[in-house]
Image (cartoon, helix red, strand yellow):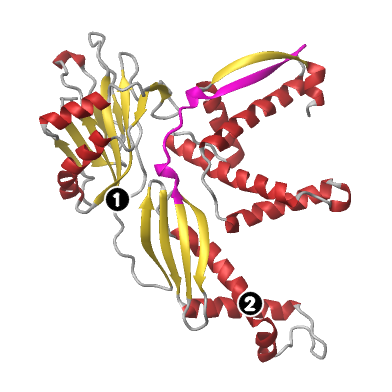
Amino acid sequence: MSEPSFEILDDVAAPELHRAAWEACNRKAWYFGNVSNDEHATPFWKMDLDGVAAFDALWEAVRPRCEAVSGGPLRVIRQYANGHTYGLGGSPHHDDSRPGTFTLLYYPMPAWEHDWDGETVFFDGAGEVARAVRPRPNRAVFFDSRIPHAGRAPSRSCRALRVTVAFKLERLDESRPAGPVEFQETRREGPLREYTMKVAEELVERAAAEQLAALGRSVRLPGFRPGRIPQAVLRQRYGARARSEAIRKLVLEYAGQAGPEGSMVSAAEVVTAGERVGVEVKVTTTSLRELPDVAFSAFELQRLVPDPPDPDAEAIADLHLREQVMDRLSEAYAFPIASILIEREFEALCKAAQEQVAGGDVDREELRVAAERRVRLGVVVAEIARRHGISERTGSELEDRVIAWITAQARVTERLVPAAELRDMD
């Protein structure tokens, strides 16, 4: 098994591009509160650099050297800067768990003294330090994103900001082998990607036949015993319905394979579905890993404090705070989700609402909005947990930990509320 890619690159950019990169790092765009993971959450500074011309140009300058090491073409998923001062070092972590993902760390500082420390250290499988890279100006280190590493804080004698610019990279997909379902990428724009998904006619026919057989076991027709309806009769009466349902299920089953790991289907539109020609679907995905980081430290939350203390009122206050966090996340991550993915959650909400409402008269449109929000926030919570190393056994426990972590980063004010008033909010 070959060793993971790792290469130190010196003199990465021409002097004028190095200066432009450092000037871009001195903008008033830093925010405080980023962490490497959740186990040793020492926060440090961060700046988003997506779309910053100097770093787009820097990537194009260093791209050939990186692609020579990786053995194939690469694209940038995200680019941003981390800032560390004395006492604010990072914790061991890996940037991605997928094969074919890489990180380029660039040191844009114009100077760095020998006794300022601040190395980037890399760990072996036993957790021992295997390599250490000094932050020399205009140096970069390119490595497999699965290698655990950490940025060390500068020494006490350093009064400067230790800056690393991270380019998160992935190898461009090789052409996929032919099969019953094929994908062709047609557009990329930020986190959005569009694909043409082609489903072979034989797969559609097989799925339609299975759907037709299921209908034959359940429908009743005059003159035929249940389960004994001839195939020709079934096909004549229900063939179009069976094919339509089969296509819907195939889209639901395969559309999620269009994008890379960590993608969500935002739209799926059947373009052609004629017999003997197969099915062609336009699939749009949102790559969650390419969504920009959110400054959770800018979230403003209000914690209601029951007066006098009351366990029931405190539980209601916790739910109120939780809903505020979810509202902020919903505003920050407003990407669409294909309706076909929302149906299961929507039906579950409808069933629960009809059981609780007398007469079963519920606002289905309102429930559909709620279903979309729940599905979207579910994947957002999972992505935040992945980025910040938050893990838990069950989905509900993971959501609790992510909400607690975000609350700890946010600006929270407290307001005393009569306990009786809180209980009335239930």
Label for residue 100? Answer: 1
Q: Amino acid at mark 2?
A: Ala
Q: Position of residue 399 (x, y in %)?
A: 58, 36
Residue on which disc 2 sits = 242
Tell me which segment is drawn in magenta. 286-308
Direction top: furthest residue? 157
Q: Amino acid at mark 1?
A: Gly
Q: Position of residue 253 (x, y in %)?
A: 53, 63
- Residue 191 in view, yes or no: yes
- Please give left or right for residue 172 compared with residue 70 in the image: right
In front: 25, or 288? 25
Say if 116 sits above or below 320 in the image: above
- Please give left or right for residue 178 compared with residue 398 in the image: left
Any magenta on residue 304? yes
Query: Circle 1 sits in a helix, a strand or a loop, which is it?
Result: loop
Measuring 68% from the left and 50% from the top, which residue is drawn there?
A: 368
- Please give left or right for residue 54 compared with residue 204 in the image: left
Measuring 42% from the left and 34% from the top, which residue is drawn there?
A: 293
